Image: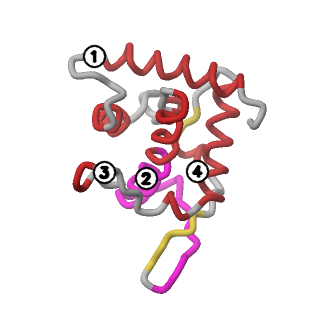
Amino acid sequence: MSNQGGGLKWIYADRDPDAVSVIERRLAETARSDGFINYSDLVQGVVFFLTKDNGMQPFEINTYEWFGHERQILGDYLGFIAYRTYLEADFLASALAVSKTDLRPSKFFFDFARDVGAMKPGEDPDRFWLTQIVRARDWYRSQSKW
């Protein structure tokens, strides 16, 4: 995802509906069970089809040894899903995805929340995150699609 020229642009997620669907389904299941899902479990076994110069290339993230580009890929998909849920229902679904080590979303979650206007300047990050968790759980429970 990039924020060039004031508009959000997705690098991969907007052209990979199958991977988006798997990740969003895992987020929905997590919400309905009142849990959290760590980034590794979120992407375990997901086949991403990444746009390359020579077409779409399948790719799986090695969840045992994350690299920077793999974090960027996951961030693109989480941002895409979170932005959709923000526009549709005023919450960021990515609030349910956390780091294994500190059981919190990454710094990029909060940066993204500020960038899209969901988190206001000066707003307490922990309070914001907790509000997003409650909204995500309530919304996914109310949806028959999930």
Measured Cα–Cα span from mark 2 to mark 1 = 24 Å
Q: Are marks 1 and 4 in contact (CB under 8 Å)?
A: no
| Label 2 close to label 1 by CB (< 8 Å) | no
- Chain part drawn in magenta: 54-78
Locate residue 61 relative to residue 106 in the image: left or right: right
In which quadrant of the rendered image does the C terminus lie? top right
Q: Measured from the top left, where is residue 93 in percent x and y? A: 53, 33
- Residue 3 in the image: state x and y as whole percent: 28, 51
Kindly identify which residue carries mark 4: 43
Local crowd at mark 3 within 10 Å, few (<14), some, or many (≥20)?
A: few
Q: Judge the density around disc 2: few (<14), some (14-19), many (≥20) Cα neighbours within 10 Å.
A: many
Residue type, mark 1 in image: Glu
Q: Are marks 1 and 3 in contact (CB under 8 Å)?
A: no
Earlier sequence position, callout 3 versus callout 2: 3
Q: Is residue 31 visible?
A: yes
Instruction: Say which mark, if any, is on residue 76.
Output: 2
